[in-house]
Image (spheres, helix red, strand yellow):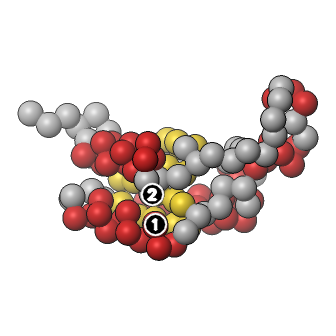
């Protein structure tokens, strides 16, 4: 019997075109989740979306450089327009905006590693 723990849920996965991100998209998609993946290169996004769709997964993709605020906002807007919202956000893409104690990061450095600014009014 197939697990359906994510049935009816929507997830955004940044860095979802290969490795851990793609594997996560595949697994939760197999369990009924609708998935939006992102990656910096459109070709990679399109290829990964095609692969996942061939596996029967309800998936969409958006090119997004997580370090660029406008890209992050576009990813959120795309997901809301396509699926009406989302239930979880897996920030898988690696962005090295700051090395050291998080409390010493500047506001702009912190913004590069988080989607929170996109979610706030």
> Can residue 66 be seen at all in this image of the molecule?
yes
- Decide if residue 23 is on the left or right side of residue 68: left
Vertical side of 23 occupied by 2: above or below: above
Which SS class for mark 2?
loop
> Can residue 12 be seen at all in this image of the molecule?
no
Q: For residue 17, which numbered disc appears in the image? A: 2
Q: Residue at x 90, y 41 (%)?
A: 106
Closer to us: 115 or 20:
20
Q: For residue 61, which numbered disc appears in the image? A: none
Residue 1 % position (x, y): 9, 33
Q: Residue at x 23, y 37 (%)?
A: 4
Tag 2 or tag 1, which sits nearer the N-term? 2
Q: Residue at x 88, y 43 (%)?
A: 107
Q: Residue at x 22, y 64 (%)?
A: 54
Residue 48 % position (x, y): 38, 63
Vertical side of 59 occupied by 42: above or below: below
- Decide if residue 44 is on the left or right side of residue 103: left
Residue 41 % position (x, y): 55, 69
Residue identifier under label 1: 45
Alpha-carbon distance for marks 1 and 2? 6 Å
Residue 26 % position (x, y): 31, 48
Circles 1 and 2, Cβ within 8 Å, touching? The answer is yes
Closer to us: 60 or 50:
50
Q: Quadrant of residue 52?
A: bottom left
Which SS class for mark 1?
helix
């Amino acid at each position: 019997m197939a697990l359906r723990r994510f049935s009816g849920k929507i997830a955004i996965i940044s860095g979802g075109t290969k490795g851990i991100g793609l594997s996560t998209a595949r697994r939760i998609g197999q369990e009924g989740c609708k998935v939006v993946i992102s990656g910096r290169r459109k070709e990679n996004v399109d290829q990964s979306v095609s692969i996942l769709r061939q596996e029967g997964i309800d998936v969409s993709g958006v090119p997004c450089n997580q370090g660029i605020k406008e890209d992050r906002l576009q990813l959120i807007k795309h997901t809301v327009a396509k699926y009406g919202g989302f239930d979880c956000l897996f920030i898988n893409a690696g962005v090295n905006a700051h090395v050291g104690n998080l409390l010493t990061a500047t506001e702009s450095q912190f913004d590069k590693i988080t989607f929170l600014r996109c979610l706030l009014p």
